[in-house]
Image (cartoon, rainbow, N blue to C red):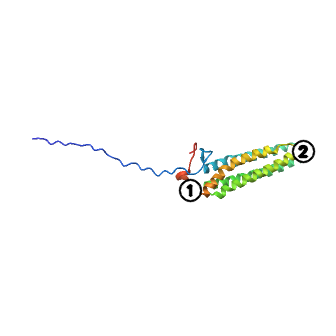
Amino acid sequence: MMKETEIIVATPVTTPALSLPDYEPKVGHKCCGCCCDSRRAVIIVESIFGIAFNTIGMILLLTAADISAMFDDDEFTTEFATGAIITSAIYGFGILVSLIVILGAISFNASLVGLGIVWTVAQTIAGIVLQAQSYNNSGLRYPIVDAIIRISVASLLIYPLAVFTAEVRNGIMSKQTYFARERHSCCCV
């Protein structure tokens, strides 16, 4: 008797092509050309310059006010302490504004982030005016250099705030688009 043999033919198995989700390229701005998205930039700038620097400034100023109390000149001590308290209150308000701006960035609220722009402009103008008065009283020249430095720094601080505000108002940056396409960072997760 003859045995029947089975012939097994190998047929290639095809797997369906993996379907990747539709990729949408980033439409919004990358801060400094490549670093991070505008939302992340607002949070970083306000955390460092708004909260940390204002806190350090307030602590240093109040410490200096305590040190000035050791001088024998009561008029100087009183004026310095009063100025330190007023300036520290301004620093404290700046911290509050920075917290509001960060909340605005987290919640994609352009108006709250716009408050940071208004505060930075007001702070810059007040600083220039007060510094110019100080130059006039002391007889020093060239307050324009101080003004140029203040305006330059303010411009760098306003840059991410203005970009984020514009992106939110133009519909580029929102809760829906951020996690789908706008989130970007070269170094932070």
Question: Residue reaching furthest left?
Answer: 1
Q: Between residues 52 and 132, which one lies in front from this camera angle?
A: 132
Residue 110 point in image, percent of width and height: 64, 57
* Label 2 packing within 10 angstroms: few (<14), some (14-19), many (20+): few
Q: Which residue is mark 2?
A: 73
Q: Which residue is mark 1?
A: 175
Residue 5 point in image, percent of width and height: 17, 42
Is residue 151 among what the camera can see? yes
Up-down: is 142 above or below 101?
Answer: above
The span from disc 1 to disc 2 (Cα, nearest Å) is 58 Å
User: Which residue does the image show at 80% across and 44% down from the upper left?
Assistant: 64
Label 2: which secondary element: loop
User: Which residue does the image show at 24% across and 43% down from the upper left?
Assistant: 9
The N terminus, quarter of image: top left
How many numbered marks are there? Answer: 2
Residue 102 point in image, percent of width and height: 65, 53
Is residue 63 among what the camera can see? no
* Label 1 packing within 10 angstroms: few (<14), some (14-19), many (20+): few
Q: Between residues 174 and 78, which one lies in front from this camera angle?
A: 174
Residue 95 falls left or right of residue 77 = left
Label 1: which secondary element: helix
Amino acid residing under circle 2? Asp
Q: Are marks 1 and 2 in contact (CB under 8 Å)?
A: no
Residue 46 falls left or right of residue 178 = right
User: Which residue does the image show at 71% across and 55% down from the upper left?
Assistant: 118
The C terminus, quarter of image: top right
User: Which residue does the image show at 72% across and 46% down from the upper left?
Assistant: 153
Residue 71 falls left or right of residue 90 = right
Amino acid residing under circle 1? Lys
Residue 96 falls left or right of residue 78 = left
* Mark earlier in primary sequence (1, 2): 2
